[in-house]
Amino acid sequence: MTPKVYSVTQVNFYIRGLLEKDFILQSLWMRGEISNWKRHSSGHCYFTLKDSESAMACVMFRGDAMVLPFTPQNGQEVIVCGYVGVYEKTGQYQFYAQLMEPAGVGALSIAFTQLKEKLEQEGLFDADFKREINPYPKTVAVITSPTGAAVRDIIQIAKRRDPSVQLVVVPALVQGQEAAPSLVSAIKQVNAWGKADTIILGRGGGSMEDLWAFNEEVVARAIFASSIPIISAVGHETDVTIADFVADLRAPTPSAAAELAVPDRQAERDRLHALTLRIQFAEDKFLQHGRQMVLSFEKRAGFRRPMELLAQGALTLSHLEERMDRALTRQLQEEQNRLLGLCDKLELLSPMKVLGRGYALAKKESGQLVRQVDDVEEGEKLSLLVTDGTIGVTVTKKEIIHGKEKTDV
């Protein structure tokens, strides 16, 4: 018998049919570690799922990948749901993942952590970008569900604290797939309106899934882009959302948000009244002290007899002037006496004083003083300096005197 020959396409098509008829392989949950994760420009994701002994090629089409609440990473252990099929062009069988969630940790928790880290690195949580809440607003916009308990609590507390504040409720979805776009649209509407001083964004409590709209990236970026300060008031005090980190101020509850946004007028009045009383008390005390000072001045002699006080001052000034004159005269006389004494000492040391006693100074024509006989020669002309002038002489004889003896030279 001649064997029947099949083409490669026919074989791959047949294998595909077998796999599609297998009940287990068409609805399968599988656990493994992600490796070689790659998101193609088309939006399809390709990766390998492996364990300690084996591996399987996997693909997730764009439609399924777009609804993943977290970003899969290499080395992450996940549980996937899908089916096994054959890619006929290459004859390779692979797993077509339709659902994916982290093993051991919820997908929403992973998504929350990943988005928080991403926005924090971009600076959306920085305190430098936080705007101050208007302490005395005229209009407060409340973005929340118009039928929830949160809006009723906000209105009740705000009106009790300050009835003059205008509250504008901007309806928005706070739960479900359409909640995030609805919240973003409401934030943009309030900013476009431009008449609100503060925005309260929030809702009542619920599970993480219920509050997930406030963890969406589009909502976080809308809060950051708002030109009007936003108070985040999502859930209960223990609930934490991405909106809380981006908002200008976080309130633990919607009721607390109303207290933070709207000042308590009665408390302000009480505080103003207390300040008024303190000012009045300080004023009375100041006036009382002033009166006591005036009475004290009135009792002083200078206040009662000012001319007498001036006369005493003039007399004191006159005495001081006399003392100063005497002191200056005495000091001047002492300085003159000291100067005369110095002059006398200087005169005693003067060469002219010596000449006055009958001595003379002999100088050569060069101006050199003659100190001894050997300094001159016979016939040399000298000048004799006396007290009243000079005398020109010529050396005719030199004698050297040793004691009482004379020696001719």
Image (tube, rainbow, N blue to C red):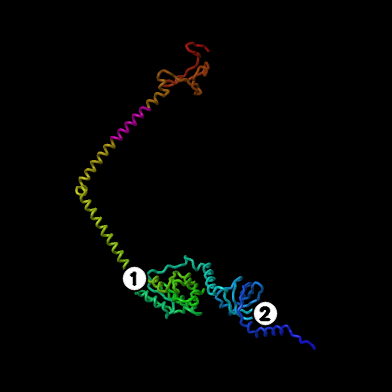
- The image quadrant that residue 313 belongs to is top left
Is residue 228 visible in this depiction of the protein? no
Give whichever of 102, 149 is nearer the camera: 102
Vertical side of 120 occupied by 372: above or below: above
Residue, x 58% and y 73% (percent of image)? Answer: 72
Q: Determine the main secondary structure of the stretch shown in magenta.
A: helix
- The image quadrant that residue 332 belongs to is top left
Instruction: Left or right? Give the position of 370 relative to 324.
Output: right
Residue 125 in the image, given as x and y percentages of width and height: 49, 68
Is residue 95 visible in this depiction of the protein? yes
Write down the residue under mark 1: 265
Give whichever of 353, 402 is nearer the camera: 402
Vertical side of 3 occupied by 394: above or below: above
Write down the residue under mark 2: 93
Vertical side of 295 occupied by 177: above or below: below
Mark pair 1, 2: CA separation: 72 Å
Residue, x 46% and y 79% (percent of image)? Answer: 173
- Residue extent of the magenta highlight: 326-342
Element carrying mark 1: helix
Residue 124 in the image, given as x and y percentages of width and height: 50, 68
Q: Mark 1: few, some, or many residues within 10 Å (few <14, many ≥20)?
A: some
